[in-house]
Image: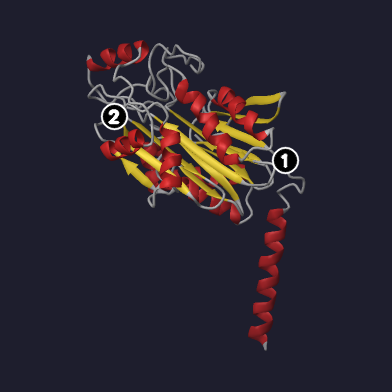
Amino acid sequence: MQRRKFLQLSSLSVASLSIKQNNLIPNTIKKPIVISTWDAGIAANKAAWQVLKNNGRALDAVEQGVMATENSINCCVGLGANPDREGIVTLDASIMDENYNCGSVAFLERIKHPISVARRVMEKTPHVMLVGSGAQQFAVAEGFTLEEQKLSTDAQKAYENWLKKSEYKPVINIERSESGHGPFAPAKLESGEWNHDTIGMLALDNKGNLSGSCTTSGQGFKMRGRVGDSPIIGAGLFVDNEVGAAVATGQGEDVIRIAGSHTVVELMRQGLSPEEACKKTIERVIKAKGIEKCKQIQVCFIALNKNGQVGAYALQKGFNYSVCYADDYNKLTNSKYIL
């Protein structure tokens, strides 16, 4: 009898804790809404918002949104991005809808919109991921054009500068080219360099459905064949329509090690707000890697829950994210950080 009474009291305590945690989330659902990484997200959000405000599907919004960034000719994302150490641009992307359907491509060359190829993988194949020449072959078969393999002016200059020492040494928030020209060039840092090689996006539509996308050129001057977290479902991107969605940016290897975006979503399932879930996941990165090594990298997460509540957290100072939920509200916010 005493054991039964103890178990009943324990159950009540757990239930009370769950209610207390869930009270952190407002009852009023804010939708539609779109959130994306970095200041490139301002323009990307505008494209996504055109879909959402017209009662469009979140999946269409997150594809159209990041396509705006892929269209830009800059050293950040898409074919204008910095190449690998062999001088070749390779692209990764992933997309996920409200029904756990997902698709991705990795190590893809000469295709302007890898996010759209990822969606075709999701919708037209029994697979989740296609890579390399196979991904390119599939894209061409689906009607995508093979673009000329030619570096943009900015990327060519950055690559030539890199070749002088040929050192691969990612620096916090400044993985990108030294010139930073282009419509999505981020704010200039004190070092005179520029950053941001990934854009991730999450959206909640008027029907209350979530979707997410992520597209990247990977880290500039990476080893040939290197793939980061962006095309890996559960690492760079994860969507659970009952709970919320998350996307990552930064040092991909360390996001993969802890299944970062999936971890954020599972923490939201436990009742944490998006910001709290992102912070706890960053703390897990520190635990896994060690604080001294973490001082040399950047990892960031953004999250969106079913109530339209957003949040973000970064390992280091310097990360920002863009939020849009009205024609006159599309703003950049500096993320909180730990180190």
Question: Residue 46: image x %, image y %?
Answer: 61, 25
- Residue found farthest to the bottom: 1
Q: Which residue is mark 1?
A: 30
Q: Which residue is mark 2?
A: 222
- Amino acid residing under circle 1: Lys
**Front disc: 1 or 2:** 1
Residue at (62, 51) in percent of width and height: 272
Residue at (69, 68) in percent of width and height: 13
Q: Is residue 87 above or below residue 116?
A: above
Can residue 214 be seen at all in this image of the molecule? yes
User: In front: 221, or 32?
Assistant: 32
Q: Residues within 10 Å of mark 1 (few under 14, many from 20)?
A: some
Instruction: Please say if the residues under marks 1 and 2 sit with CB atoms less than 8 Å apart.
Output: no
Mark closest to the chain's N terminus, 1 or 2: 1
- Amino acid residing under circle 2: Lys
Answer left or right for 322 relative to 5.
left
Q: Is residue 316 above or below residue 185?
A: below
User: In front: 238, or 209?
Assistant: 209
Residue at (66, 84) in percent of width and height: 4
